[in-house]
Amino acid sequence: MRAMRVLNRRAVLQVAGSGAVALAAACVSGTAPAVPRVSLARSGAAQPAAPPGAVQGQESAQPVPPAQDSPWTTHWEDIVAAAEREGTLSLLTVVGRGYRSVIERFEQAFPGISVQHGAESSPTVWLGTARQARRASSAAFDVALVHPDRALAEGGPEGMWAPVRPLLFRPDVLDDGAWRGGVGARFLDVGVTLCFDWEYQVIHAYAINTDLVQPGEITTVTDLLDRKWKGKILASDPRIGGGLLSAASVAKSWGTDVLKRLLVDQRPTFSRGGPSQVTEALVRGRHPIALGVRPKALNPFREQGLGHNVEYLDLPDADFVATNSLLYFDRAPHPAAAALFANWILTHEAQTILTGGLRTNSARTDVEAFEPDGIGMEGKTYYEQDREANYAHTAATQQFVNGLLGHAP
């Protein structure tokens, strides 16, 4: 498996000269100089990056002077040429119409490359497809934009992934200042090389009815332990889903004693319904505090002129992060196209199109947040359940909560 991964990397890097390879290595080490954003298309000339929220296809009226040629742009040209010779990119994503716009933009930027797009709603299905291809000593896809949990937990030990980090060479992609926490922090696997997390949407666990709770009254989980809130908190099931992930966040920040006080001593009401039921109860004022309110359930109330009394609490000691990642398949059939796409999809322009289509937030610091209820405080750390190092903690939290409340029905 190790030998096969090395061959894949070489196959990609052979499209450039030795100077480009050295530049790519320098970029990975963080020594490459920062440069302005440049064209995402065949030419090395600079193009205006799409402004946050821009409509796809609209061009800026402001001319941009051409960029000076440099070794990395030469490498970019060589990668584009090699990808065009391959002619195809095989892309795997989860189901979602939002991916269509970014695929169309990629094909417009690189008209010699056709995207074969496979969209699956179930990890079980795409993992099965990938495994079947591996048994035939090939790969069904080149790259994936998928949720990382099962991709890492199951695909990682099976050798399904080749390192994506050696593919990245664009300075605007490898600039630490462009990413929340820096480039290294965006890799979710313990080896910091396989799984690049381009999405960063904070899921605010708790929300309040501002008719019943004063803004600023609750700023940390320990404020929820006040006797005045005893029996007044409505919560989604803490043994599964978002309720469990918030419990893991609390346990990570405060330990299991505080978690027990929150889930047992405060006598919250656990809802067996979904986010819609929890949200309606909060909007109607039947509970002052609720865990499990989601924007998709709240927005219809807001459209009816209701729900403006609902405010999300930003609690880094209870919140968690939704992620979506870029991974590179071992034995990818189109390695040059994979390298091109991996660098392109992480640029400012591509991230703006992608997150705008999906209505989510990018981990890039220069991309506008498209989900305003998913923004976290700058400089604060939120629980990332999809980080490989946190898998054991989430599992241990679930075991602890099951011991408190019994297994979920």
Image: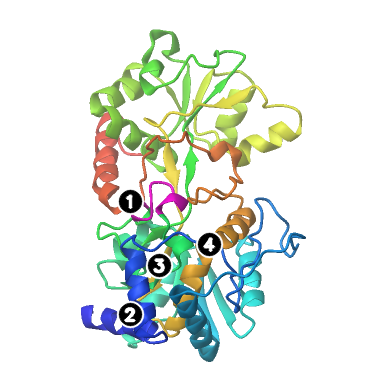
Magenta residue check for 32: no
Task: Tell me the kind of residue under disc 2.
Answer: Arg
Question: Is residue 303 shown left or right of residue 204?
Answer: right
Please name which of the two marks, 1 or 4, marks the residue nearer to the observer: 4
Magenta residue check for 178: yes
Q: Are marks 2 and 3 in contact (CB under 8 Å)?
A: no
Q: Which residues are magenta?
A: 176-185
Q: Which residue is mark 1?
A: 387
Percent across and percent down for residue 102 are 62, 66
Disc ID at residue 347: 4
Residue positioned 35% across, 24% down in the render: 263
The tag earlier along the polypeptide, 2 or 3, is 2
Residue positioned 66% across, 62% down in the render: 48
Q: Give the distance between the C-alpha atoms of the residues marked 4 and 2, in whole angstroms.
A: 21 Å
Q: Which residue is mark 3?
A: 327
Percent across and percent down for residue 252 are 28, 34
Q: Give the distance between the C-alpha atoms of the residues marked 2 and 3, in whole angstroms.
A: 14 Å
Q: Which residue is mark 2?
A: 9
Task: Tell me the kind of residue under disc 3.
Answer: Leu
Tell me the element at label 2.
Answer: helix
- Dot 3 alpha-carbon crowd within 10 angstroms: few under 14, some 14 to 19, many 20 or more: many
The tag earlier along the polypeptide, 2 or 1, is 2
Question: Is residue 5 shown left or right of residue 186?
Answer: left
- Dot 2 alpha-carbon crowd within 10 angstroms: few under 14, some 14 to 19, many 20 or more: many
